[in-house]
């Protein structure tokens, strides 16, 4: 069964160096949350450390680290984050994290725009590691 929660708080931040996309069930004391973070332009050190992809912090889902997200996509209800099979198995959870997003804009950014950079990074990082 997929992990699902309603995001009563969302955040999209791009400071020029990194991009953060966050979802939480409560803006003050979240129990369920997911934060995705990536360097906009990973440098040589990032790549050497294996930090060229997307980092996830899934809070209570016990998902935390790089290379654990296989995909992120838009759905009618909001967003689906698909975990890598190994990451989901290690955490003992279903690979799908379904996040119901009440507002179709995240900090003024449409959901497809907010997630596209993360989808693109996942694909580019997988291609780079496959070499």
Image: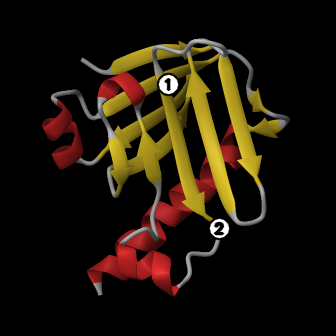
Q: CB under 8 Å between callouts 2 and 1?
A: no
The image quadrant of residue 43 is bottom right
The image quadrant of residue 21 is top right
Q: State the mark number for residue 40.
A: 2
Residue 62: % across, % down: 29, 31
Residue neighbourhood size for the residue with mark 2, other residues' Cα within 10 Å, grouped as few (<14), some (14–19), many (≥20): some
Q: Earlier in the sequence, mark 2 or mark 1?
A: 1
Q: Residue at x 57, y 21 (%)?
A: 24
Residue 87: % across, % down: 22, 44
Q: Between 103 and 28, which is closer to the camera in this rendering?
A: 28
* Left or right of 8 in this view: 59: left
Residue 79: % across, % down: 54, 31
Disc 2 from disc 1: Cα separation: 22 Å
Does residue 84 sit above or below 121 in this rendering? above
Q: State the mark number for residue 79.
A: none
Residue neighbourhood size for the residue with mark 1, other residues' Cα within 10 Å, grouped as few (<14), some (14–19), many (≥20): many
Q: Residue at x 15, y 39 (%)?
A: 90
Does residue 47 sit above or below 55 in this rendering? below
The image quadrant of residue 92 is top left
Residue 57: % across, % down: 43, 39
Helix, strand or loop at mark 2: loop
Residue 76 visible in image: no
Query: Coloured how?
Result: secondary structure
- Please identify the quadrant where the N terminus is shown: top left
Q: State the mark number for residue 33.
A: 1
Q: Residue at x 34, y 58 (%)?
A: 67
């Amino acid at each position: 069964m997929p992990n699902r929660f309603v995001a009563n708080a969302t955040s999209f931040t791009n400071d020029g160096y990194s991009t953060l996309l966050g979802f939480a069930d409560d803006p003050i004391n979240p129990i369920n949350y997911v934060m995705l973070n990536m360097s906009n332009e990973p440098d040589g050190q990032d790549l050497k450390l294996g930090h060229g992809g997307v980092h996830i912090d899934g809070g209570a889902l016990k998902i935390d680290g790089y290379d654990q997200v296989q995909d992120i996509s838009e759905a009618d209800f909001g967003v689906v984050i698909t975990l890598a099979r190994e990451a989901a198995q290690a955490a003992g959870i279903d690979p799908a994290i379904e996040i119901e997003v009440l507002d179709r804009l995240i900090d003024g950014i449409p959901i497809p725009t907010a997630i596209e950079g993360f989808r693109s990074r996942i694909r580019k990082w997988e291609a780079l590691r496959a070499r």
